[in-house]
Amino acid sequence: MQELQFARQVRLQLNRGLHEMPSATSERLRAARERALAQQRVAVRQSALASVGNFLHSHFERLHVEQLLAALALALGIGFAAYWHADQSLTEMEEIDSALLADELPVGALTDKGFDAWLKNSSAE
């Protein structure tokens, strides 16, 4: 409470001094205040979604069509490479399965522990 009373007393003293000030000085103070207010930035309240939109707009407005096309081409290239690699892997597995099914090996040979090692060695060759 004492701070509020002190602030009120300071305000009263300043207001009294304002009336005793020469008019030329008060005019200069008024002009300086107007210049300061004109240069002061006014903070505008906005929602969180609006600030996200401003962020995206300010960071992506400098992008050019060529950059977007290059990024799209890169993404398509990576996607195609991943698809091709997966397709090649499936094709290799299909060939191995087809060879195993077409061969006249007994079922016991397929369940043998050494058969997996032989299969890996033969597919590497």
Image (cartoon, helix red, strand yellow):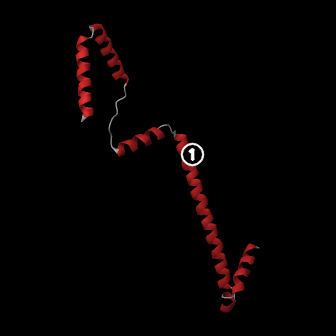
- Residue under the point 26% across and 19% down: 14
Rendered-image quadrant of the N terminus: top left
**Viewer-proximal residue among 27 and 16:** 16
Task: Report which residue position mark 1 lands on.
Answer: 70
Q: Position of residue 16 (x, y in %)?
A: 22, 17
Amino acid type indicated by mark 1 = Ala
The residue lying toward the viewer, choosing from 60 and 102, is 60
Q: At 58% across and 50% down in the image, what residue appears? A: 74
Q: Secondary structure at mark 1?
A: helix
Residue drawn at the location 72% of the way across and 85% of the way down: 114
Q: Is residue 108 above or below residue 48?
A: below
Q: Quadrant of residue 107?
A: bottom right
Residue 58, placed above or below residue 39: below
Farthest right residue in view: 125
Percent across and percent down for residue 61 are 47, 38
Q: Quadrant of residue 82?
A: bottom right
> In the rendering, at what x and y percent does residue 69 appear?
54, 45
Res 20 quadrant in image: top left
Q: Is residue 41 above or below residue 53?
A: above
Q: Residue at x 33, y 43 (%)?
A: 47
Crowding at mark 1 (Cα within 10 Å: few <14, some 14-19, many 20+): few
**Relative horizontal placement of residue 92, taking residue 56 as reference (left or right):** right
Numbered-mark total: 1
- The front one of 81 and 24 is 24
Report the front residue among 25 and 68: 25
Identify the image quadrant of the C terminus: bottom right
Q: Position of residue 94 (x, y in %)?
A: 63, 76
Q: Is residue 121 left or right of residue 21?
A: right
